[in-house]
Amino acid sequence: MPIPAAVTNVLVRLLNASAQHLGERLGQAFGGKSSKAPFLIEQVKSAPRYWEAQIEYLKRKQARERELLSLYTAKVDSRIALQEQELQDRRELSLLQRELLRDWQAKAIQIKLNEIQMLWHKDAWFYNISLPDTEQILQRQQHRFLLLVSPPIISKYSPDYFHNNRQIELRKVGEFLNQNYPGYKDLRPVEFYSDYFKDAIYDIDVKRLQQILAFVPTAIIYSDISDYEVNWRVGFWGWQNNQVFLLPTLAWNWEKVQEELEACGYGKKESLRTIREVIVAIHKLLAAFLADAYYLYIERNYEPQLFELESE
């Protein structure tokens, strides 16, 4: 049974508003004056390895452009092959940039690893997160975007249906990212954890975590479900950014949607299942938007994956 237009229209407005807020805040985090990202990227681009690679890329690009002109009326397959070569060259240049950025991070991350035990003993809150996972995140050699999802805060007055299987639901976000933003590939790697936090988190906890992971570009999605609405929150930071950016709360009145679904013929259980599926889907879309935005800010050649996710 299709979801009524009245419901989907509300979701579209919610996601449009969140995209605008995220775009503005991500620009400040990854590319604005308060971020060191532009400085780091310029330092990387002045490195001899990158400079030599850029020169070789430009030579190949000019040769391709000359050949494309001569193939103006030639077979389409030949033109496509040259365009694919261009895309591959641009991707290789992007991968080199990420490798050099990671090299710039390495020394600062090692210092943080040496401090990590002291931070754990200093603040009991850190026992809410996994120390081995944290060390693994910091030691990872591949450059990637880190995305964490916290268990939601669920009101005792909300339906039991929301309390059940919440960790299983969050794993679906990981399956989605592994399919579309796999961490083991170089194109748009996202490292994702749905069980990093042992319990739900708050705004202040995002700022606590940034003390440790300041050198790893990170976004955290966390939420709460009351007896009538869902509130999504997003916290993130960019390269060596001392400021944590928090997205204004995105609120969705699920109770009103349940009434509309039941008025359209949905049973109570079916309407609640649909609402839960939508909650998970919005987690997925927020994750995709954040990942695409991050890679767009650091790489002009990046091609967003979000537009390919037609089913979502």
Image (spheres, rainbow, N blue to C red):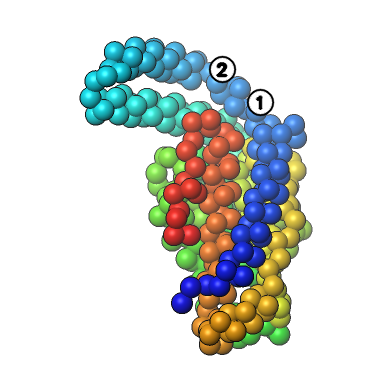
**Lower sequence index among marks 2 and 1:** 1
Q: Are marks 2 and 1 in contact (CB under 8 Å)?
A: no
- Residue 224 vs residue 175: left or right? right
Check disc 2 and give the amino acid type: Ser
Q: Quadrant of residue 12?
A: bottom right
- Could you say where residue 72 lies in the image, as x and y percent from the top left? 30, 18
Name the residue located 63 percent from the left edge and 57 percent from the top edge: 15
Name the residue located 71 percent from the left edge and 43 percent from the top edge: 24
User: Which disc, if any, is residue 311?
Assistant: none
Query: Is residue 146 among what the camera can see?
Result: no
Q: Is residue 232 above or below residue 293?
A: below
Q: Is residue 226 above or below residue 177?
A: below
Q: Quadrant of residue 60?
A: top left
Q: Is residue 10 above or below residue 255?
A: above
Q: CA distance from mark 2 to mark 1?
A: 11 Å
Of the pair 154 and 159, the residue shown nearer to us = 159
- Could you say where residue 133 lies in the image, as x and y percent from the top left? 53, 56
Name the residue located 43 percent from the left edge and 15 percent from the top edge: 58
Name the residue carrying label 1. Answer: 39
- Could you say where residue 229 lies in the image, as x and y percent from the top left? 70, 73
Name the residue located 63 percent from the left edge and 85 percent from the top edge: 159
Check disc 1 and give the amino acid type: Phe
Dot 1 surroundings within 10 Å: few (below 14), some, or many (20 or more)? Answer: few
Say which element carries label 1.
helix
Query: Is residue 206 among what the camera can see?
Result: yes
Say which element carries label 2.
loop
User: Which disc, if any, is residue 46?
Assistant: 2
Of the pair 64 and 59, the residue shown nearer to us = 64
Total marks shown come to 2
